[in-house]
Image (spheres, rainbow, N blue to C red):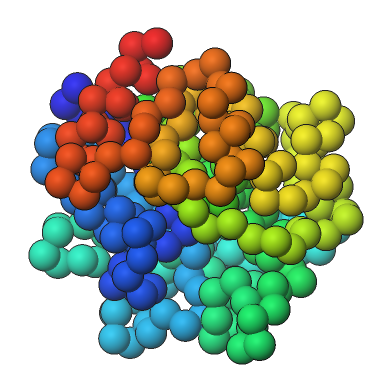
Amino acid sequence: MENTKILFISQEITPYLPETEMSKIGRYLPQGIQEKGREIRTFMPRFGNINERRNQLHEVIRLSGMNLIIDDTDHPLIIKVASIQSARMQVYFIDNEDYFHRKAVLKDSRGRFFADNDERMIFFARGVLETVKKLRWSPDIIHCHGWFTSLVPLYVKKSYNEEPLFTNSKVVFSAYNHAFNDSLGENFSKKVSFEGTTDDDLSIISEPTFRNIARIAFRYSDGVIRGSENLPPEIDGLMGGLDIPVLDYQPTEEYIDAYSVFYDKILTE
């Protein structure tokens, strides 16, 4: 369907981060969907190893300045933007000095999971949705890529379900072979708690493992995509039992067309 509005929320996008299966889809899928006549917006975290000068990021003052409260602490929300000229598309970056100015993505130089990755993913999810509200832009499809975006479906369906811009939005989640063995902290579900979420919602992530993070993403999505050909067994098992549409893995030369058709299917369900 032309004129459909698609919001892409990605854990990784190249050229801002190194090329991976996920970052390449984050880069080329929005362009391909835009070339099919659809309107897009694209978001990712402004991780500290992204070179702002080389990539010509600049702050969007009119969108910045809000504070998000996480675990009873205020955190300023900064929005930056850069353009991929060859694709005629912009990428919005969610930034915050405490969460995203270290020179790494999810692990330190010794390979240790950052202790605040829980708050970082909460801040990112809510930061994207608050920024879209400021843009006054109503997406038909919200497509999330990677576990770092796993809370977006929950917030769209429970915390922002009465926000007119998101009332009719459908959520698609792409799962990738990017598992982690760490826990997101014993207070994770308490920190995730926000307007509209219930104890039942949050019970899924009382033990915040990679599997349970996927469970909450799947529960509040309208469709799920196998972003990697080989997924961790525990995720494969979850996807096999879903009662929502699931799109199997699509090779590089076919995924843009296949995802486009899948979006239309989700919108007409």
Quarter of the image for residue 195 reads top right
Residue 130 to residue 2: above or below: below
Q: Is residue 189 visible?
A: no
Quarter of the figure with the C terminus: top left
At horizontal 38% and vertical 84% (from top left) the residue drawn is: 51
Total numbered labels: 0
In the image, 186 versus 250, the foreground residue is: 250
At horizontal 70% and vertical 78% (from top left) the residue drawn is: 112
- Would residue 148 be found to the left or right of residue 19 on screen? right
Q: Residue 123, how many percent across, how many down?
A: 64, 57
Q: Is residue 246 visible?
A: yes
- Would residue 7 be found to the left or right of residue 163 on screen? left
At horizontal 43% and vertical 26% (from top left) the residue drawn is: 246
Quarter of the figure with the N terminus: top left
In the image, 79 versus 221, the foreground residue is: 221
Quarter of the image for residue 179 reads bottom right
In the image, 16 versus 246, the foreground residue is: 246
Q: Residue 9, how many percent across, how many down?
A: 44, 49
- Would residue 158 be found to the left or right of residue 13 on screen? right
At horizontal 32% and vertical 70% (from top left) the residue drawn is: 19
Quarter of the image for residue 3 reads top left
Q: Residue 83, how many percent across, how many down?
A: 24, 66
